[in-house]
Amino acid sequence: MPTYTGTVTTPKSAPDAFDYMADVSHTSDWDPNCEAATKTTPGEVGVGMKFHLRFSGVAGQEMEFDYEVTEYDAPRRIVLEGGNDSQHSVDTIEVESTATGSNVTYTAERGARALRRARRGRSARRAGDPARTPRHPQTEGEHLMALRYEPAHV
């Protein structure tokens, strides 16, 4: 599974940055490829919360993903798992306090549904091996730029 990751620094406190990022319905504010993002279950964000996202794809094709929060440790970490009929994704957002705000790291593991099943049982060390982690040019913070500006989003 390809893994994409990016980290940005924001002047926002870790709890504020976490709350903003954990509410995945904000994704269209900071990801230029996300055309729409909505909560599909009511209530506060936490384990079991579901979201539906629509992305612009390659050659104008749209992709839709349904996500569910599978781990929630505010204000430090949230993990969402989802995808569609052909693709699977595990997205992890981690927030770390700094002296001047916080760092937000977004990691997305993407793959075909068949690859997901084949990958089960592989060691975490092998899956996280930096030599196996391709870099996407937009993951070095370009999508998370909204976190740097006041009072825009976070």
Image (cartoon, rainbow, N blue to C red):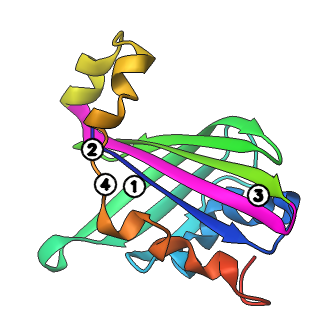
Q: Residues within 10 Å of mark 4 (few under 14, many from 20)?
A: some
The alpha-carbon separation of the residues under discs 2 and 1 comes to: 9 Å
Residue 106 highlighted magenta (yes or no): yes
Q: Residues within 10 Å of mark 1 (few under 14, many from 20)?
A: some
The secondary structure type at the circle numbered 2 is strand
The alpha-carbon separation of the residues under discs 4 and 3 comes to: 24 Å
Verify CB contact (< 8 Å) between mark 4 and mark 2: no
Discs 4/3, front: 4
The alpha-carbon separation of the residues under discs 2 and 3 comes to: 26 Å
Q: Which residues are magenta?
A: 99-113
Q: Quadrant of the C terminus?
A: bottom right
Among numbered discs 2 and 3, the one appearing first in the sequence? 3
Discs 4/2, front: 4
Q: Amino acid at mark 4?
A: Arg
The secondary structure type at the circle numbered 3 is helix
Task: Read off the residue under disc 3.
Answer: 18
Verify CB contact (< 8 Å) between mark 2 and mark 3: no
The secondary structure type at the circle numbered 4 is loop
The secondary structure type at the circle numbered 1 is strand
Vertical placement of 112 versus 117: above or below?
Answer: below
